[in-house]
Image (cartoon, grey):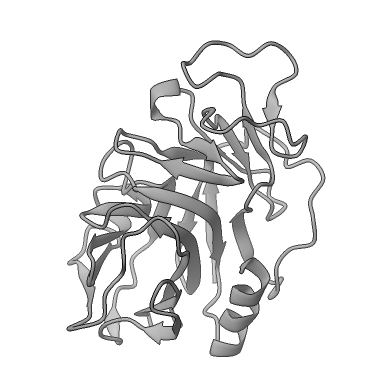
Amino acid sequence: MKVIRLGQSLMNSGDIPPPPPPTADLEFYLRKNQGMEGNLEADCVTVPSPLYSSDDSNFPTNAPISLWKDFAGTGNSAIQTTCANRPLYRAGKAHFDSGSPNLEISSQIDLTGEFTMYFKANLDGTSNKGFIGGSSSNFWRISNNKQFRVRIGNTANSEFIEATDTITINGKYDYIFVLQRNTDSQLSMHVQGGTEGYNDKVWGATGQEDSDTMEIKSIGASYGTTQTFAGELSDVLIYSADHSAAERLQVYNYIS
């Protein structure tokens, strides 16, 4: 499998903790309450030195997050330079409110083969809220409380829909959402946790195929300020590998 990176990283990850199992093919990792920084107060007034940092345990509630370092060891980062578009720090999580919060990856990730992506969060909304994306042709979002949509390389949408099971909006219980593509270019989705206690539940139809390149630039939006996420984000992991059930369980246990 092949991962192509565009551009240069803007930050180094600093001290990198042990990566989550499985350790192979980890391309990007935003870790709860780790590597978060801010240089502005909640009203966008400049903070005197030193900067706010989750690692220094001095980040005030609702101060905007300007940087979230990647812990995959690639030197990548998630960045937002516009104060009004920054998520807010809340108890080690990034809170995405009703405005246009989003983060941009400093070095775009292009996935050309197998992948597995994890997005751990609680939700304040489910109507067309983007998880991960790169353009109008590349995104993964929740469309409503039963449906997810994936578009890769401007091809037809892949829809993952449940007839009765739902995702609950309550801002309390974390879900881990998983999107995968295997060596045959078949897509699948899994859901772990939440109010319902889902246990690696297969969400919607399997076997939908899309072999195009998945471009990832935005975190917490489909792209830019379009279809921004609503809720609190804990962890994001992107692997250039198709994980087995046992490997998914390892990641669930690591970030739970």
Instruction: Indicate left or right for 10 with 245 as reference.
Output: right
Q: Quadrant of the N terminus?
A: bottom right
Query: Which residue: 30% across, 87% down?
Result: 207
The quarter holding residue 154 reads bottom left
Relative height, residue 113 to residue 80 (above, below): below
What residue is at 79 percent from the left and 55 percent from the top? 17
Q: In the rendered image of this protein, does residue 200 appear above or below residue 110? A: below
* Image quadrant occupied by the C terminus: bottom right
Vertical order, 221 against 116 (above or below): above
**Residue 116 in picture, x, y percent from top left:** 50, 71
105 horizontally vs 138: left or right: right
Q: Quadrant of residue 9?
A: top right
Q: Position of residue 212 (x, y in %)?
A: 33, 66
Q: Is residue 174 above or below residue 241?
A: above
Q: Residue at x 54, y 49 (%)?
A: 5
User: Total of numbered circles in the picture?
Assistant: 0
Along the horizontal axis of the image, is 247 left or right of 171? right
Along the line of sight, the residue nearer the viewer: 98 or 8: 98
Query: 233 or 242, which lies in front?
Result: 233
Q: Point out residue 36 in the picture as x, y percentages from the top left corner.
A: 64, 38
Observer-nearest of 168 and 96:
168
Query: Which residue occupies 61% across, 30% down?
Result: 60
Q: Position of residue 187 (x, y in %)?
A: 35, 78
